[in-house]
Image: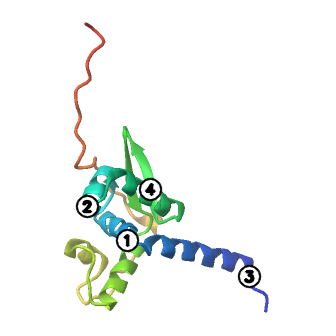
Amino acid sequence: MDADPSFDQLLQRVVRALRAIGEPTRLRLVCALGDGESSVTALAAAAGAPHAAVSRQLQVLHEAGVVRRRRDGAYVLYRVTDPILIELCSKVARSVGSPIISPRVAATLFNGDGGPLQRTPTSNRRRAAPQPPATRSRMPRKSGVR
């Protein structure tokens, strides 16, 4: 029986994503992104790691398709590509007896009986307006007049 090349490509993408989140720092970042979009600075604080190290780990996650990024002025904001990844991490953690995401995030992923929420296709969902990161501060610019 010959393997389907498109199925093999899909399997390779799945393996790449699982390898990416299979490292403790990257898993911590994915869990932190379960609360929503965040800047590298906020993620570095949440992970307790240097900014440069977090930036490198986010690059790995981005290349694996686990996170997306967008520029907001001088900041780059990251988010998980699909909430199902947070749900997967949560279920694996629960299966070994250790919750790794906040109760608030868990409540959004699971209904009262512990089962997953029913999801609607992404195209039908309304997106909330993006919020600026909490760590952002704006300094007034100096004018060119001296």
The mark found on residue 69 in the picture is none
Q: Nearer the viewer, mark 2 or mark 3?
A: 2
Gap between marks 2 and 4, in whole Å? 15 Å
Ranked by sequence position, the earlier of labels 3 and 4 is 3
Name the kind of residue labelled 2 in the image. Ala
Q: What SS does tag 1 mark?
A: helix
Ranked by sequence position, the earlier of labels 1 and 3 is 3
Ranked by sequence position, the earlier of labels 2 and 3 is 3
Ranked by sequence position, the earlier of labels 4 and 1 is 1
- Give coordinates of residue 62: x percent, y percent: 49, 59
Q: What SS does tag 3 mark?
A: loop
In the rendered image, which residue does mark 1 sit on? 27
In the picture shown, does residue 25 fall above or below 68?
below
Would residue 91 be found to the left or right of residue 124 on screen?
left
Gap between marks 1 and 3, in whole Å? 31 Å
Q: Nearer the viewer, mark 4 or mark 1?
A: 4
Question: Which is more toward the observer, 51 or 86?
Answer: 51
The mark found on residue 4 in the picture is 3
Question: Which is more toward the observer, 59 or 77?
Answer: 59
In the rendered image, which residue does mark 4 sit on? 56
